[in-house]
Amino acid sequence: MFSLLTPMSGLPWCLLPIWPLVFWRIQRLKAWFRAAGGPGSQMLWGVMWNGRVVVIRLSDDLSGHHPCTFRAPVSERLARVLTNTSRPCPRRTPGPQAIQSGIISRDPGVRRDYGFKIPDT
């Protein structure tokens, strides 16, 4: 336990003259964490040799954030594309020209007369 007039235990003697500044930095860091962190989030902080207060570890669970109320406008075209996903992709279905010509889609142009065979994968 520590306060403005009683420094924390283990504080180096060289930091005693600037203890009010260190205390103020600790209070600012704790206030930020209360505002930014949610219930269940944890923070480990420390004081460096020069009096700086640093965050050593910060939990990933900052679930106390309020959801963003800003919604970006979406164009009508994009909204239509995102809602209508029932149609298949046209590039994955064979077109009428490929069906009429009889070209197999996996035939890269290598014929059996060259001695190469297309592997079945």
Image (cartoon, grey):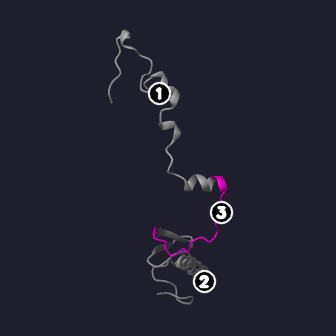
Give amino acid for label 2. Answer: Pro
* Residue topped by disc 1: 99
Kind of residue indicated by mark 1? Ile
Residue displayed at 51% across by 30% down = 96
**Of the residues under marks 2 and 1, which one precedes in the sequence?**
2
Image quarter for residue 15?
Answer: bottom right
Q: Secondary structure at mark 3?
A: loop
Measure the alpha-carbon separation of dots 2 and 1.
82 Å
Observer able to see residue 48: no
Q: Residue at x 42, y 26 (%)?
A: 106
CA neighbours of label 1 inside 10 A, class few (<14), some (14 to 19), many (20+):
few
| Marks 1/3: CA–CA distance | 44 Å
In terms of secondary structure, what is the magenta stretch mainly? loop
In front: mark 2 or mark 1?
1
Looking at the figure, which quarter contains the C terminus? top left
Give the residue number, with chain letter if any, for mark 2: 20
Q: Spot the residue most to the left.
A: 120
- On screen, residue 99 versus residue 76, left or right, reads left
Q: Nearer the viewer, residue 111 or 70?
A: 111
Q: Residue at x 56, y 70 (%)?
A: 50
Residue placed most toward the observer, 65 or 41: 65
Q: Which residue is mark 3?
A: 72
* Segment colored magenta: 58-77
Is 64 covered by the magenta stretch? yes
Q: Secondary structure at mark 2?
A: helix
x%, y% of residue 108? 44, 21
Query: Is residue 13 shown above or below 6?
Result: above
Residue type highlighted by circle 3? Ala
